[in-house]
Image (cartoon, helix red, strand yellow):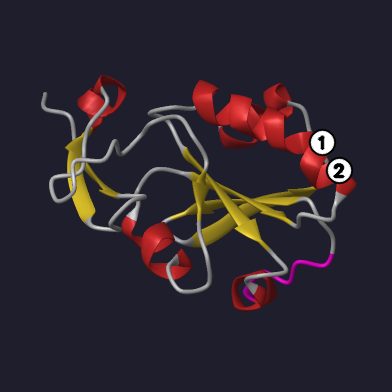
Amino acid sequence: MESPNLNIACSGCRATNRVTASRLADGPSCGRCGAALLDGAPVELNDADFEAFTQQTELPILVDFWAPWCGPCIGMAPQFDLAAKQLKGCAILVKVNSDDNPKTAGRFGIRSIPTLVRLERGREKSRQSGALRAAQIVSLVL
């Protein structure tokens, strides 16, 4: 039986790419700009591109709402990066600076940071507030 195709938005040019599910771990590249689609690093999004990126991507997305002045956010950042590497090919981890992107933070009713929101096809499935370790972050997705 053939693996299904999944749509994945490019973190570079935002083009939608169709990738066979069985090839997610093979390091697929964007058909338009050549950037790695699933490089295991968090993707920075803003108010202008958040909706399109999250709705075009069929993999689970975990969003970290944070701010540069937030001590727990800064402390969790290396753990979030580690979780992104561990989830490479299974999910996409995204960072949104809630101070610079009030529209997106407001849409999700972000009242405290860090807050992690799990999305599937742009829709919220779960959330968790507070700083977490990499293993806890991974468990929110798997």
Instruction: Using the image as rendered, state which of residue 140 and residue 101 is in the foreground.
Output: 101
Question: What kind of element bears circle 2?
Answer: helix
Question: What kind of element bears circle 1?
Answer: helix
Tell me if 118 is positioned left or right of 51 in this view.
right
Please say whether residue 71 is one of the residues in the magenta stretch: no
User: Hey, what amino acid is under mark 1?
Assistant: Gly
Say if residue 60 shows up in the picture.
Answer: yes
> Which residue is depicted at the point 76% across and 27% down?
133
Residue denoted by label 2 = 72
Please tell me whether residue 14 is drawn above or below residue 19 in the rendered image: below
Q: Position of residue 70 (x, y in %)?
A: 85, 52
Instruction: Using the image as rendered, state which of residue 29 and residue 92 is in the foreground.
Output: 29
Q: Magenta segment, principal secondary structure?
A: loop
Quadrant occupied by the C terminus: top right
Q: Which mark is residue 53?
A: none
Q: Residues within 10 Å of mark 1 (few under 14, many from 20)?
A: few
Range of magenta residues: 107-111
Q: State yes or no: discs 1 and 2 in contact (Cβ < 8 Å).
A: yes
> Which residue is depicted at the point 70% across and 65% down?
98
> Which residue is depicted at the point 76% across and 54% down?
68
Q: Which mark is residue 75?
A: 1
